[in-house]
Image: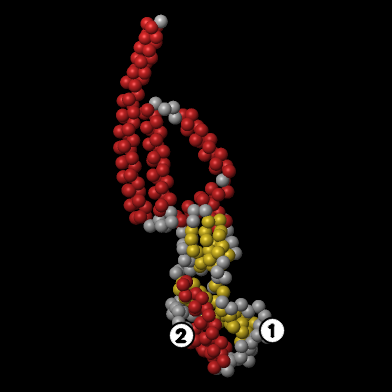
Amino acid sequence: MENLFGDVFSQKANEYLSMAVDFIPKVVVAVIVFTIGLKIINKIVDLVKVGVNKTGISSELKPFINSTVAFSLKVLLFFVVAGIVGIETTKFIAVLSAAVFAIAMGLQGSLGHFAAGILILIFRPYKVGDVVEIQGQLGIVRDIQIINTNVELFDKKMAIIPNGSAISDIVTNHSFEGVVRVDTEISMPYEEDFPKVRKILEEVVKKTPGVLQDPKPFVGIKEFDSHSIRLSVWPYAKIEDYWDVLFAVNANLKKAMGENQIKVAYSEGVELGTIGL
């Protein structure tokens, strides 16, 4: 009985020793590959960061690119190391692929917005600080995220617009050239002399703080209605000066019309202070 027990123990010990002899070198090689692989990945990520900085890609997209590259390389290294140790990776890859597919199907709407966010950050139809009109929402872009674009409306509300919706329709960027046109309108009676009024208004607008001289401010007749002539006044300003210029121009126009004894006619539908379209 004792001999039988000793034979079994000896047999198992030899099996385990044989397994250890086969497994330990694989572990050593795997540890070496893993250590060297991490160092190589860090070097590659550093090179990617340098390359991304040189391309002028949006700053919002840089962390995403760097993280994606690092994550992808580390996943690849994991499978290489697992294969060296002898772990069966085929089934693991199949399960992982199925999980990714299931997640993708469940989040297909969000993934569409995600892809749209990448396109926006790469091609930059607008950037943070631009005055834009997206999906009928007019305001200043405050943040471009991977899923949403946040637009601060001029009534100080925040419109959170899914990126997929943003690029599926026409986007009007009012500050494409770095400036924005501040439109306002004023009604003039038919009996007033337009050249005289235009000269007065142009001088007032030019002297208003924040109004740019290039592009040159414009005053012209927009339309004739039953009671008055509607004039369009178009000064240009920097984006950050929009509201200051709007209120200052309206105040100065009213003051100039009064000082020069020019009547301001009433007309239905006149809107003051809209972004130039």
Q: Is residue 139 left or right of residue 4?
A: right
Q: Crowding near pointer 2: few (<14 within 10 Å), some, many (20+)?
A: few
- Please determine whether, in this image, residue 198 is positioned above or below residue 99: below
User: Residue 38 location, x and y as percent?
Assistant: 33, 40
Q: Which mark is residue 100?
A: none
Quadrant for the C terminus, please. Answer: bottom right
Tag 2 and tag 1, C-beta contact below 8 Å: no
Q: Amino acid at mark 1?
A: Ser
Q: Amino acid at mark 2?
A: Lys
Q: Which mark is residue 207?
A: 2
Residue in the foreground of this view, choosing between 210 and 205: 210
Q: Is residue 269 left or right of residue 6?
A: right
Q: Residue at x 61, y 88 (%)?
A: 264
Q: Secondary structure at mark 1?
A: loop
Q: Is residue 176 left or right of residue 13?
A: right
User: Residue 100 location, x and y as percent?
Assistant: 52, 39
Q: Which residue is mark 1?
A: 226
